[in-house]
Amino acid sequence: MKRNLVCIACPIGCPIEVELNDAGEVVGVTGNTCPRGEAYARTEVTHPVRSLTTSVKVEGGVHPVVPVKTAAPIPKEKMFDCMQVINAVTLQAPVAIGDVVVKDICGLGVDVVATNND
Amino acid sequence: MLQYDLVVVGGGPAGMAAALQAKEEGVAKIVILERAESLGGILEQCIHTGFGLHYFGEELSGPEYAGRFIREVQQTDIDVMCDTMVLDISDANVVTAVNKTQGLMQIRATAVVLAMGCRERPRGALSIAGTRPSGIMTAGTAQKYVNIDGYMPGKKVVILGSGDIGLIMARRMTLEGAEVKVVCELMPYSSGLQRNIVQCLEDFNIPLRLSCTVVETHGKERLEGVTIADVDERLQPIPGTEQYIPCDTLMLSVGLIPENELSKGVGVPLDNVTKGPVVDEYRETLHPGIFACGNVLQVHDLVDYVTEESKIAGKGAANYIFGKKKGGAYAATKGVNGVRYIVPQRVNVRGGEKVKLYFRVGQVYRNAKVTVTCNGQTLLSRKRPKLAPGEMENVTLTEEQLAAMNEGDEIVVGIEE
């Protein structure tokens, strides 16, 4: 079986073709122009992941919210579960880039970290 | 009157990179004038990741990318004036600016870097019939509401235009619980990056309707719905295809325009296509000592390229300040066969350095060739699997290729299918 993807590893957006055998295992990746593309294609057809970026309420800072991201990509289907957890958080200023906002979110082994100072 | 070697107008990624590069080249007195309350420019509200893959080799969010340059600027003796609005630049490079603490001030500059960025095309630039209720805004305005001010501008959203900001906002609104009903794109292709169509629309099953536009808005106080319709090849709505979509918010992502009021004021000639100044390979405008870089020069899709371009402008400004600018013979660049524009528009062929030409195409091409010719001679022919209007392309001319040219020659870049 073949699956056609557009690589999202970088803004070039290479068209990638992934060849899968009957067991659903990847047997070939073509069209990518870098190793990141191959890694993306392999993950995308087996267990797709995404980086999640959003914002968190902050009290006593310059702005009412501060931006955050997952420190590593998380399973795509867990994005809304993570949003629920993040939206329940209120931080106290000061916040610095890299501060851990939620540790090990949804038990995924990934922290949510601040991406700006406030 | 204040005196600086270099005045940088705008403290976003372009202005900061230009100032830092000029500092590295040894320019002593530099000031950045920024209209907002802090440095960073539009990156402050671009909280999604994808910045810095080229320049830093890692994937950063907008504020993180800006943060690295802000820290660098703070570690130098570059002066920064925030909350400061530049009103005018005179023919003699005197910059007039105003702020709350110093009032009106005049700064004599040896060189000026224009780095004012761009603004979004507003509703007024489109001819959409209907009422004028609240709930209609540009995607960038909505982005500021959500990411900086911390509130949601609506619950049911239609987005007109598939530029990157529109796509990013489709995902952002969905994550925060809004329902994005459809993204309508007038053209038969999206002007956004492919990766954004995948991770912002397809991931959330948001439909993208190509060759489709909003023909009417409805609602008195608040937007209640829009009528969309398919368009023909002349981009005119096709009667009978109208469809009413209930929504409380219409976001516009229909293009960006370089913000060149100051450039026009000083009489810098602009390019009709880019709407930015005409520049040479060091991004010097036709007004000596005035340089331009970033989105004020041409709208970029990647901040990494803004940084690259702005460092070139910073170096050019330093050369100008130190009287090291090379005398030269200028060739003009020209886009044909689908190449809409080229930056820089002119190149000093006696510069003794390789020069990268950036350009955009006017439609989608597959397996096409990019060719560069001069005086009927082919200098370059490169195959590209895909070329799209949303993605800036570049070709590099070597020092030798340029040295073989003369004043007034035309460097022609075109697409062959």
Image (spheres, coloured by chain):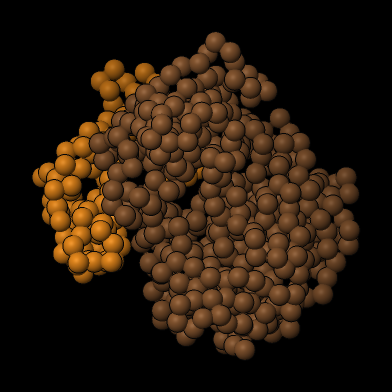
Q: Is residue A90 left or right of residue B66?
A: left
> In this view of the protein, which residue sits in the foreground, B172 or B407?
B172
Q: Position of residue B254 (x, y in %)?
A: 54, 39
Quarter of image, res B345? bottom right
Residue at point 37%, 28% (across, down):
B224
Q: Colour of chain A?
A: orange
Chain drawn brown in the picture: B
Please name the residue shown 17% across and 48% down the image: A86
Figure disc tally? 0
- Where does the image place residue B100, in percent across and percent down from the top left? 45, 77
Q: Quadrant of the C terminus of chain A?
A: bottom left
Observer-nearest of B190 and A105: B190
Say if residue A105 shows up in the picture.
Answer: no
Q: Is residue B294 visible?
A: yes
Q: Image quarter for residue B385?
A: top right
Q: Quadrant of residue B67?
A: bottom left
Residue at the far front in the pictured view: B220
Residue name at image x 40 percent, y 22 percent: B245
Q: Quadrant of the N terminus of chain A?
A: top left
Residue B267 drawn at (x, y percent): 75, 65
Q: Of all residues shown, which one is farthest toward the left? A: A107
Nearer to the camera, B203 or B252: B252
Task: Please say if B79 is above or below A35.
Answer: below
Q: Position of residue B241 (x, y in %)?
A: 52, 13
Q: Is residue B369 above or below residue B307?
A: above
User: Which residue sits at x=28%, y=52%?
Assistant: B150
